[in-house]
Image: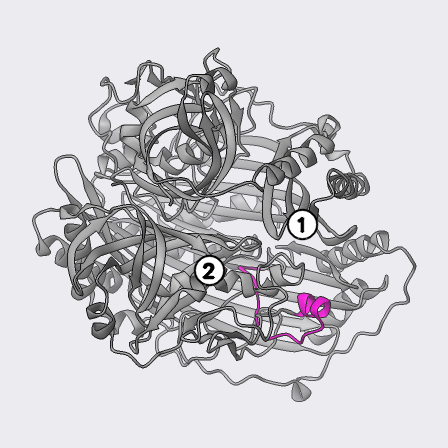
Amino acid sequence: MIEKQFAYDVLTAAMATGGDLAEIFLENTERGNIGLVNGLVEKANWGVDYGCGLRIIYGFSAVYAFTNKTDRASLINLAKDAAQAVKAAQKEEAMPKGVIILDRRDRQVVENRHSIATLPGGVPKNDIVERLRAASAASKAYDSLITQTEDTYAATVQDVCIVNSNGLWAEDRRVRTRVFVSAVASSENEKQTGYKGPGAMKGYEFVQDLDMEELGGEAARTAVTMLKADLCPSGRMPVLIESGFGGVIFHEACGHSLEATSVAKKASVFADKLGRQIASPAVTAIDDGLPANEWGSLNVDDEGRPTQKNVLIENGILKSFMVDYLNGLKMETPSTGSGRRESYKFAPTSRMTNTYIANGTEKPEAIIADTEYGLYAKQMGGGSVEPSTGDFNFAVVEGYMIREGKVAEPVRGATLIGKGSEVLMDIDRVADNLKLAAGMCGSVSGIVPTSVGQPLIRVKEMTVGGRK
Amino acid sequence: MEYTAFKEALFKNAEAFGFTDCELYYAASDSFTVKIFGGEISEYSNSDAVGASFRGTFNGRVGYAYTERIDESVIEGLVKNAAENAGIIEEEEIEKLYPGDSAYPETANYNPALESFDAARKIETALAMEKFAYGIDKRVASIDYCVLSTDAGVVRIANSYGLDLTDRANIAVAFIVARVEENGRTKTGYDDWHGNDLNNFSYEELARGAVGKALSYLSAESAASGEYPIVFDNRAACELFACFSGIFFAENAQKGFSLLDGKEGAAVAAEGVTIRDDGVCKKSFGSASFDSEGVATQNKAVVENGVLKTLLYNTKSAGKAGVKSTGNGFKPSFRAAVGTACTNFYLKPSKISHKKMLAGIENGILITELAGLHSGANTISGDFSFAADGFLIENGKKGRAVEQITVAGNFYELLLNISTVASDLRFAVPSGAGTFGMPSFLVSGLRVSGL
């Protein structure tokens, strides 16, 4: 995406005032999306995101600049302005360091682990519409209480080229496809929504392999069940959280607090807990950027470093943080391939990829049978956390009461809250049915695709915020 | 490539392709941010970005495509994809380009003086702000975020009917997250400031706000579960209304995504509730001369003394309802299709002070922070359950801090149950969904879950 000499000249201009590392992040992203409301196409869009981000690291600080203009004069000017900012911020004048750029044949190439069968660009739009329509029809056919459907398709092809002054040169193509199927069930004064949102680092083959009717039916089933559900009781009780998107509990309660973004400034409850027990021995948790075609995977992170499998917690003991290059300097820890950003408009920082609680040995049914009373959160929604206190919250999309070891009546409108450090210690049972699910995660470097996951787990006691 | 040359080449190509009309929406911004941590600049950025969206009518339907690359190479792709997108649109109500209004209101969102406040002074201000915050109290363990940013933006809309509009705005935003520690307890406090004159900015006041809030939360404990009278302070109230603002959009009502469908003229809120959406408001920074379709913005009552006067319309939802657009046809970004958003959307304050409002409450909770708004709300049914922090209200006075509770209810019911509105109207930082202004208010009958 950029010539060697051009990159050299830009980085040399960036390093002229004594920066320690300069980095170019070039991006071209094509996005297409189609949205149906009640089975009719309401929105269709296509576009190109394009630009260049330039970062200069000096000491533990960074200057960041970006532009859409990538001609020679514009990028050299961008680099010069950024270098001036470095100069102004430094207390002492520093000597320029050299720029190393390797020849193509000497560059380390990370093998592509994500084979793509059909790129989104050439897919007939009518085919996409027909498949979305099938989901909508299945939702409506499920029950006459279904009054609205929304079905969308979104695909992106992100091409990036990352070059830094230490000789790193990485190129990567990220092809992602997601569908979002939702249904609204209505009674006279009440409306409830159900949805499914699978995604993968795949091309159109992902949609072709999906059973759209099943997705539409499932979304409708949740909506109708919740429409008929009673209000969730409030108070403290045992909570069972189902596999798949249930993993959002670990993402919020713990994941963000293990990112170097907050750890490096000691703004995390887990900042000085490496090697210590932070979770119950039943919990092993992993962030893994490697799995082929998984939604949150990457060949290289947005700093050009190969992603890896990071065991964060092993049998309750904190083993590793998720670390990007700059925060790694502060922490004296190498990057774990966790540097991510939404686009060239954001400086990268440490983020999650595919983050999950590993399988235990118990059957899910056994854990349910062993619970006298509590809440069973079959499907979770999103949540958020304040990393420095660990206070988190997330929403239950589809919940049921557990009575005498059995899943009983459905309940709606529950939010779960707690403190990360406490809830991790209170996970007392972990099942063996691990599943991952696609999500979008927002933080300081923008919104990035991440997967969450877990097998069914039980938390001894949590605050359930219902309306009753 | 320059804007005018790009526009002309694009329109020419589109007409040759068979588009019967076309529009270019162009947004450019210059943004500056400095983050301070530990007395040093931890991040500094200074950037410019442009984006353009093409929209046009092809075979009677409107198609979209956008680009951040403003050069000859993308024009063909834009036109071809917009035509393909137009080809699959099936909605009954046909979207149309807007020829333009005869007059547009003036906005005062652009202050040239902000542009002359240079980077060195902004850095100096941010450094001083962090230093001052550390010095306020010895329990300050860290200033986790100390950020000053400025943004200058231009929006242009031009179409083949000869419309050619330009609107400019600039804004400065500063915020602090202070972390305090005492007896092994950690709490954080956030405060922000926004405006377009940095000479009016008191970083001392901002720092005191953030640190003071963090300190006030140190005493926090959960509260007993139960039903309480709840006061939302003006910030939490802004977040709550921003979350549910979509219920006032005609397009949502028409699709069955809002229970306000068919309620124009009916009582939907308590009598003391008047909500206005004002396109050009001097007290707020969310003003716009025109919306993303080129329709002039208006100042109108949305709810007056509890009665729903109008929903917010874009041209398409207005066409469907047989009314005129209210000038609320905004795009959340240049990339997106025209949707609906608020301008300066505010709840009219009363003359009752915040203190006086609390004085009438024997046993209640004042909510100052809400979390999980993106996930804890069912924006269709109005049901919500949010994590919250705040203070007890005991015998008419603010008491100890409260943490680890949820507050749950239904937004439609909440509108009807607002019993007192205070005088402390405060506008939040403008966002893609609009700019919200709220005084604190008291509402009965919400469920708190805690101990």
Three-letter residue code for mark 1: Ser
Q: Which residues are magenta?
A: A325-343
- For residue B37, side relative to residue B27 (left or right): right
A466 in the magenta segment:
no
How did the renderer colour the structure? one colour
- Front position in the image: B323 or A152: A152
Which element type, helix, strand or loop, lies under badge 1?
strand
Three-letter residue code for mark 2: Glu
Task: State the count of labels.
Answer: 2
The residue identified by callout 1 is B47
Residue A304 visible in image? yes
| Residue visible at 32% across and 41% down in the picture | B384
Classify B141 as above or below B325. Answer: below
The residue identified by callout 2 is A422
Question: Residue B5 occupies which quadrant of the picture?
Answer: top right
Which element type, helix, strand or loop, lies under badge 2?
helix
Which chain letter goes with mark 1? B
- For residue A293, side relative to residue A234 (left or right): right
Q: CA distance from mark 1 to mark 2?
A: 42 Å
The local crowd at label 2, few if under 14, some if 14 to 19, many if 20 or more residues have their Cα within 10 Å, is some
Residue B26: horizontal and vertical position, in percent? 53, 42
Give the foreground label among 1 and 2: 2
Labels 1 and 2 share a subunit: no
| Residue visible at 47% across and 25% down in the picture | B438
Classify B200 as above or below A233. Answer: above
Question: Residue A147 occupies which quadrant of the picture?
Answer: top left
- Quarter of the picture holding the C terminus of chain B: top left
The local crowd at label 1, few if under 14, some if 14 to 19, many if 20 or more residues have their Cα within 10 Å, is many
Q: Residue furthest top?
A: B351
Residue B45: horizontal and vertical position, in percent? 70, 51
Residue A450: horizontal and vertical position, in percent? 44, 65
Residue A228: horizontal and vertical position, in percent? 13, 47
